[in-house]
Image (cartoon, grey):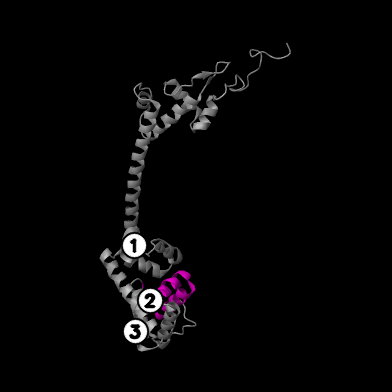
Amino acid sequence: MTGDTPEQRPATTEEDAGAPGPGSLAVGRAAALVGVSVKTLHHWDAIGLARPSGRTWAGHRVYSGDDIARIHRVLVYKELGFPLAEIGRILDDPDIDAHDHLRRQRSQLVERIARLQRMVHSVDRMMQASKPGMRLTPQEQVEIFGADWQPARVDEAEDRWGDSAQWAQYAERAAAMTPEDWKKTAAATQALNADLATARRAGVVPGSDTANGLAERHRAMISAYFDCTHAMQVCIARMYVDDPDYAEHYDALAPGLTVWLREVIFANAGARGVDPESARWE
């Protein structure tokens, strides 16, 4: 004979020693497929939890598709915290078919997900309570500041100014504020914005007593969060014009309000000895 018989062929690896049949896997490949170690599969085989049901012509045991499906069910129950002995009893219960197993696993997974979500919400609340700054949930922020408020703005502001002394001052003051304090602050801000829009529509001239009074109210609003100098207020007014989000916000209250407010703040600062053209954050 020109070819080796199965008994004569050398065996250098597990799979060389007798290839699995179609659709079956040797232990190494089965372990890689399901994400466990070969040692784990050997242990589950030894205790009768998940045994390979097939054999190669050389006598090596291999896992069928049904065997792999059972291993996946073992992994689900193991993830849910069941001991191996109980998993074996559940899977071997003759009164429960495969569909019942899947339904039970799904139900338990949904319950665990819900429990983990509740835990995540609890941790979020604890993190919020221990973090300096605004101690309002995103839902509370929207309820107080209105439907247009975006809670992400707080995080964006911290990313932008978090290293500044003014942010540290804001964080300290904000941490001491109650929801009622925030409601009062929001109401005062809305009243100021309404008065600014009315003045813009009425043609109030920057530098007039009325305009200067509005500028001082605006600075007082900022100073509720951190001590705002006239020079800082000028820098903020520049930002209003340069930042599309701020410009859109103010111009939605009254056309041209953003630029008008900048001119009002510039004129008021100039009357108090601050050159708007050279003012810096100080």
Confirm or deny contact between disc 1 and disc 3 (CB under 8 A): no
Nearest the eye: 79 or 256: 256
Confirm or deny contact between disc 2 and disc 3 (CB under 8 A): no
Q: Give the quadrant of the N terminus.
A: top right
Q: CA distance from mark 2 to mark 3?
A: 16 Å
Please give the residue where the numbered disc 2 appears in the rendered image.
228
Q: Dot 2, crowdedness within 10 Å: few (<14), some or many (≥20)?
A: some
Nearest the eye: 108 or 135: 108
Closer to the eye: label 1 or 3: 1
104 versus 160 height, above or below: above
Instruction: Please provide the residue range marked out in magenta.
Output: 226-253
Q: Which mark is residue 142?
A: 1
Please give the residue where the numbered disc 3 appears in the rendered image.
213
Q: Dot 1, crowdedness within 10 Å: few (<14), some or many (≥20)?
A: some
Does residue 180 appear in this view?
Answer: yes
Instruction: State the image coordinates of residue 282 (x, y, percent, origin top left).
Output: 43, 77
Residue found 32% across the figure and 54% down from its top: 125
